[in-house]
Image (tube, helix red, strand yellow):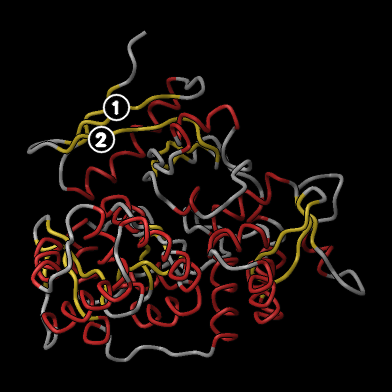
Amino acid sequence: MASAAPSPQAALSAAPSPQAALSAAEALALRMASLLLRDAGTAPAPTGVADVVTWFGAMQSQDLGSGLWSLGVRLPGRTQADIEAALERREALRTWPMRGTVHLVPARDARWMLEVTGQRAFDGAAARRAYLGLSDEHANAAVDALATALAGGGRKTRAECVAVFESSGVPSSGSLGYHLLWYASQQGVTCIAPNVGKEQTFVLLDEWVPDAHRPGRDQGLALLALRYFRSHGPTTRQDFAGWTGLTAADAKRGIAGAGEQLVTVAVEGREMIMAAAALDAVSAAGGAAVAGLGDDEMWVLPGFDEYLLGFKDRSMMLDADHKQAIIPGGNGVFRPTVVRAGRVVGTWRRAVGRTKVTVDVQPLVRLARTDRARVESALQPYGFFVGRPVEVRWPVG
């Protein structure tokens, strides 16, 4: 524990308004546990896909392969086929709930999340339709045609959906087709169903999830805040607003609505928020949960994992000098990361062949022989996940 600050246990017993004080190392240890990447006794061990996705509330999944491994790395012993089967059982689904990007969300929560966090992206898309030369009248006609084609349990591939748009008289090639698919899902008409083979498929949301949860807006905002901070905390209100795409006012409203389920902590003087239950667990364990991360704790994470995507300020996990290596050109495409003791130390790239997975690792810092052995060990679960042995290649020289 940091000698310059009282322990969380001591801070909890202080009066009148206790605020735990944590070092950056302690906060990072707690954050990795919140992200379900290590067991520190501050978060429940998930037993399936539904547990993981509900814990987070939403998980970045614009790249399907990355989204599947984000689940797999948190469910040791599960294969990609196991995860795909769980999605087919509707333990979670993919749609565009916030920031205009695809996420995995709890199936019953998809509709209210679209209404609470998706509206800003929906409102902002009018300019995009104007740029594409797509009128609201034509867009709505295309969505109506797709809803009719899917009614009664229908399920269509992306190409088949675009063909429906075309048959309704709405040009849908290239970006037009993608925008219409987004537009239909953003309105809660459709959602993304699991792939059939390698083909993305779409279904009617109300048919896929007939028992949708429908909290009021304030309740939804509070639930979003609780889920975000329990799965990403300790972190800031600004990170929460960035993650959800909410206005600052709505972010504050959600945090206030979560009430005593969230607490404020001071991380080297900076105010952050986390789940009260996690801080209680720290206190009960006498601080063991924040004892710090060891160099033997190594992870290989997908490029779009919540570990980085879940935060606007990534300085706790990523050196500024390494940002270009993770997000080349700042174009929003995140490379898979090698993480040691909670911080990014390299990237990895895989090529899945018929008989093996070849993984090229690119260190960003000097990795000793023991570190490299730990990276190779950390990659073995990925091989199990995809059902092929892993061959690891390092830079020459």
Q: Is residue 4 above or below residue 85?
A: above
Of residues 27 and 109, which is closer to you in this image? 109
Residue found 39% across the figure and 38% down from its top: 335
User: How many residues crowd mark 2 within 10 Å: few (<14), some (14–19), many (20+)?
Assistant: some
Q: How far is the residue under mark 2 from the one under mark 1?
A: 6 Å
In the image, residue 200 sits, relative to residue 218, either above or below, namely above
Residue displayed at 85% across by 69% down = 18
Indicate left or right for 100 with 64 as reference. right
Q: Amino acid at mark 1?
A: Asp
Percent coordinates x, y for residue 46 in the rendering? 40, 68
Q: The residue tagged with tag 2: helix, strand or loop?
A: strand
**Secondary structure category for the residue under label 1:** strand
In the image, which disc is placed on residue 350? 2
Q: Position of residue 390 (x, y in %)?
A: 22, 35
Q: Considering depth in this image, is 295 or 63 the residue closer to the camera?
A: 63
Q: Is residue 193 left or right of residue 186?
A: left
Residue 108's spot in the image, x, y percent? 36, 83
Dot 1 crowding, Cα within 10 Å, few <14, some 14–19, many 20+: some
Residue under the point 68% across and 58% down:
236
Q: Earlier in the sequence, mark 2 or mark 1?
A: 2
Residue 55 can be seen, yes or no: no
- Kindly indicate the quadrant of the structure image that contains residue 178: bottom left
Residue that mark 1 sits on: 360
